Amino acid sequence: MTEPARKATAVAPSNIAFIKYWGARDLERALPHNPSISMTLSRCFSRCTVEHRPDGDEHRVLLRSSTGELRPPGAEFTQRVVRHLDRIRKMTDCPGGFHVATENSFPAAAGLASSASGFASLSLAATRALGLELDSRELSSLSRLSGSGSAARSALGGYVEWPAVLDDPECCAVALATAEDWDLRDVIAVVDSGPKKTSSLEGHRRAPTSPHYEKRQEQLPARLQAVREAIAQRDLEALGPVLEDEAIDLHLVAMSSKPAIFYWRPATLEVLWQVRSLRDEGVAAWATMDAGPNVHVICPPEAEEPVARRLGALAGVQSVIRDAVGTGPGVVSEHLF
Ligand code: DP6
């Protein structure tokens, strides 16, 4: 073990799920019902600075607000961060408190996986502040324990699978291919940048109440295999239709859960419609969504410009983020405080 660094800053990207985690075997331990596969992003990321204070046991949490200041976030977010810091303190047997500041390069809690990037960056910064060097398996496993399962995937770059192995306490994500292996773009149409009303955590709880939940589970082995093969062969024509089926099924399950969860806004449908039109015109582009109203359009580099132009011109689209597959988290030298 190296000397404790006391203060460390980490950057971790968000990710977009091709095969979704929706429904848990054990929510407390963030063990999913089914494996999921994602693409790690590049421009949508969280940056987190953690300072370890060996002489105190209080944690302090600050989040960059939309107006630019570092402020105490809402009670629910603070509680999740504090619980994770307590967990890290216990697991590493390092007494003391942590001071944390975090910021996102994109709208938080709007289905753009800010908890994935947030908890992966927090886990990396906190362990580095304690002088620990985790490998990607350990970082994935620790990030997962935050309760944000998708954070397990943000611990790695490129194309990532998070398996759902029964009785595997580590349950960490593994790389399927690197970012260099396949340059895919993600054009994100932001139709609502506000926080979502129903958390993914609540969505996982309600998922089994949908009559479509079991049906989706039955289809998953074939879908997972199709996505693994499409990634191995860099075959977007094979990947695209599975992406769209998965996104629609996630929302079908959410909308038919009891009580029902509606993440879509009218502009969500408008974007989906335009993606189909683009395909009819010969542009290779396929849509997917996480638990929110915003639409991710997966496409090759040459389609990025026409997709961004078309979606940016829609009345219901507030902004367009042009993202791409990325290389994963890392430690940086610019601290937030
Ligand atoms: C729809 O429990 O990981 O994005 O912590 O809010 O990111 P957050 O949610 P989490 O569930 C992810 C749900 C999903 C699908 C996915 O990313 O696999």
Image (cartoon, grey):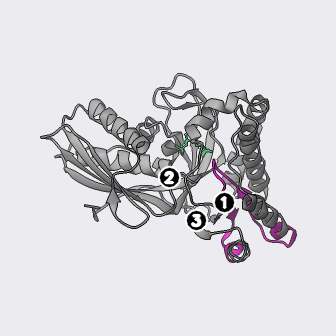
Report if the CB atoms under discs 1 and 3 are less than 8 Å apart.
Answer: no
Does any atom of ligand 1 lie closer than 8 Å to the CB of label 2? yes
Q: Residue at x 68, y 59 (%)?
A: 295
> Where is mark 1, residue-wise?
296
The residue carrying pointer 3 sits among few (fewer than 14), some (14 to 19) or many (20 or more) residues within 10 Å by Cα, namely: many
The residue carrying pointer 1 sits among few (fewer than 14), some (14 to 19) or many (20 or more) residues within 10 Å by Cα, namely: many
Tag of residue 114: 2
Which span of residues is magenta-colored? 278-305
Looking at the image, the residue that sits furthest to the left is: 55
Question: Does residue 191 appear in this view?
Answer: yes
- Dot 3 falls on a residue whose secondary structure is strand
Question: Per the image, is 284 magenta?
Answer: yes
Q: Up-down: is 297 above or below 140?
A: below
Measured Cα–Cα span from mark 3 to mark 2? 16 Å
Measured Cα–Cα span from mark 1 to mark 3? 11 Å
Looking at the image, the residue that sits furthest to the top is: 167
Q: Earlier in the sequence, mark 3 or mark 2?
A: 2
Task: List x then y, in percent, for residue 275.
Answer: 78, 65
> Where is mark 3, residue-wise?
324
- Amino acid type at circle 3 is Ala
Q: Quadrant of the C terminus?
A: bottom left
Measured Cα–Cα span from mark 2 to mark 1? 14 Å
Q: Earlier in the sequence, mark 1 or mark 3?
A: 1
- Amino acid type at circle 1 is His
